[in-house]
Image (cartoon, rainbow, N blue to C red):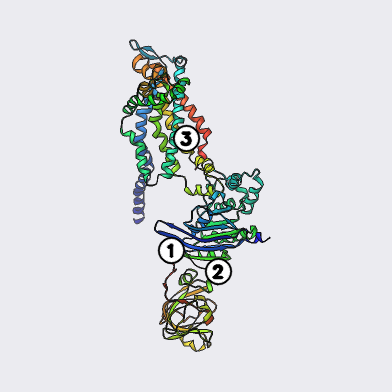
Amino acid sequence: MTATLTAAEKTAAEPVVRTTATRKRLVPYWLLLPGVLWLLVFFALPMVYQASTSVQTGSLERGFEVTWHFSTYWEALADYWPQFVRSLLYAGTATVLCLILGYPLAYLIAFKAGRWRNLLLVLVIAPFFTSFLIRTLAWKTILADGGAVVGALDALRVLDVTTALGWTQGDRLLATPLAVVCGLTYNFLPFMILPLYTSLERIDGRLHEAAKDLYASPATTFRKVTFPLSMPGVVSGTLLTFIPASGDYVNAELLGSTDTKMVGNVIQSQFLRVLDYPTAAALSFILMAIVLIMVTVYIRRAGTEDLV
Amino acid sequence: MTDTNTGGDVRLTGISKTYGSFTAVHPLDLTVPQGSFFALLGASGCGKTTTLRMIAGLEEPTTGTVFLGDKDVTDLPPYKRPVNTVFQSYALFPHLDIHENVAFGLRRRGVRSVEKQVGEMLDLVQLGDYARRKPHQLSGGQQQRVAVARALINHPQVLLLDEPLGALDLKLRRQMQLELKRIQTEVGITFIHVTHDQEEAMTMADTVAVMNGGRVEQLGAPAELYENPRTTFVANFLGTSNLIEAAVAEGRGAASDIVVTAGGGTLRLPADRCGAPTTTGGKLLVGVRPEKISLVHADDAGAIAAGRNQVTGRIVDTSFFGVSTQYVIDSPAGSGLQVYEQNIERDSRLAPGAEVVLHWNPAHTFGLDAAQDIQAGVETVEDAT
């Protein structure tokens, strides 16, 4: 009697145990669910939709249908390759400028700022309290014709040099490549500084002492220890700057001219003005592919996976 | 040839360091002879690491001069001093492999072919097979050996070791102590070793400087420091001491012994083992190491040889260590006296509560100035961590 009871109890208890175990195993998936759903609805589905748009033909009046018309890609590339080259060139220049401007600042905040460190970090992100658009419009005023900046650069004969290089035209800064690059550099600078700061701040100060102790001068210490150890920050900073900058259109729209159009401007006008959806979608995918290839090559070459 | 005798001496003259109103190191004179294994011993915050860093050039002295041999290096930056450091946390470069870590100093000095030297150095520290690994792939003990190799390969005049074994577990630490001692004997370079572990300092160093509160309390060979502590701090910090408050009955006179009274009994100690003034009636701290004391049950007190110092008391606690037993004894002369007895013939009557007599050879007694904190240098649980 007792034996049967215990057996019955056991069978009754087992499923309960199993359900708890199963539940526990499912917890990670439940936690993943909101994020996955979000990405599915707002990233994956639009991507598929855009991909299908890019191989459609037709017009707004007659409607579009999928005809697997892949030559849209070739046509888009053939028509707009100068804008692609310009995008990559401007974004690349802005990224390099961000690195040159941002590295010393991040270094200062990480190692020399002392109790001013948090204040300086707040100042770095302070521009984000204002809209991207307004900040870019402010640059329009800063670079305006006959303004103080133009006047000063003109007096210093800097404009002669930049015009000779093709970066500016005559005594204008606005509506020139230089203005667009300046805008891009300004807008993306915090995305460079913050990752740089994070990776510099993580470097153990005793490594600097060890390098000094082992006959490395301050310059050599930087070259052989500090900079290599900050590579993860350099890589993520340049990616966070280059990728959005290459697709940006606001800076070229507000600070540039028709001669400084970037691929983002073309996509925008194809979508919203020309209403040639297939070409716009194809341009988006081409840009994505180019950036993806460049980033992959870059990360491979930077070899950051070896860094601790 | 006299140059080779003094060429590697480290001489600190009047060196001090203050941070704002806090004095980390009081003006200090110290000479470390070439080729010696010198230990700076003290609790954390005693100024030993600051002293070491001033020799390395990582800290600028507030006053004073650092000489390496006859050369004044006080104003030289660390990368221009022929001195290398083994850091407490090793500070190995995480982005370089072991080979490149060890080669770092040679490359900075423009040495062309480093392969052979690095190979030999890695063999010396028995890490020849690990040359291409990254530091994080090595155990703590291996990282420690890399740090030693990275410093030694430069053939510094002086090797500075800042608590190099602090992060290792006890067994590995013992092993590395012997290893470091072996390396030092092999290369003959002056080692200055900073540690808070008195056992480590005593086993490894030829000379130990005990530091406390930014000052050197006492300096000497380990045995000398242990047998003849001159302050209560040294007596308590190096090993354990029983310090008994006593009154001088018979000061320095014709006899070679000083006689004191404590807890109703009299004790004798050699006059040359007492650095404090001994005016009759004045106070004196009398010390004896726990292992010098023999313990007998009160019933057998008659068997104690004449001429030995005797103190009666009662056992309050015992702990068995295998090779020896530790007794804690309360007596009229002082409470909490400690005795270590070898477990040769154990007397079963020696249990807590038993009345006992402690006796020892008067020659093993030392005298200290009573005007000091009797508890100075006693390690608390907090210090030990």
Q: Can you give x and y, in whole percent of width and height, for residue B363 in the image?
A: 54, 81
Q: Amino acid at mark 1?
A: Asp
Front position among marks 2 and 3: 2
Pointer 3: what residue? Answer: A235
Pointer 2: what residue? Answer: B220
- Outermost bottom residue: B302
Q: Secondary structure at mark 2?
A: strand
Q: Chain of mark 2?
A: B
Q: Secondary structure at mark 3?
A: helix
Query: Label 3 crowding class (10 Å Cα cut-off): few <14, some 14-19, many 20+?
Result: many
Q: Can you give x and y, in whole percent of width and height, for residue B39 in the image?
A: 54, 63
Query: Do the residues at pointers 2 and 1 share their chain?
Result: yes
Query: Label 2 crowding class (10 Å Cα cut-off): few <14, some 14-19, many 20+?
Result: some
Q: Can you give x and y, in whole percent of width and height, for residue A76 in the image?
A: 44, 16
Q: Secondary structure at mark 1?
A: helix
Q: Residue at x 53, y 71 (%)?
A: B225
Q: Observer-nearest residue: A159 or A305?
A: A159
Q: CA distance from mark 2 to mark 3?
A: 55 Å
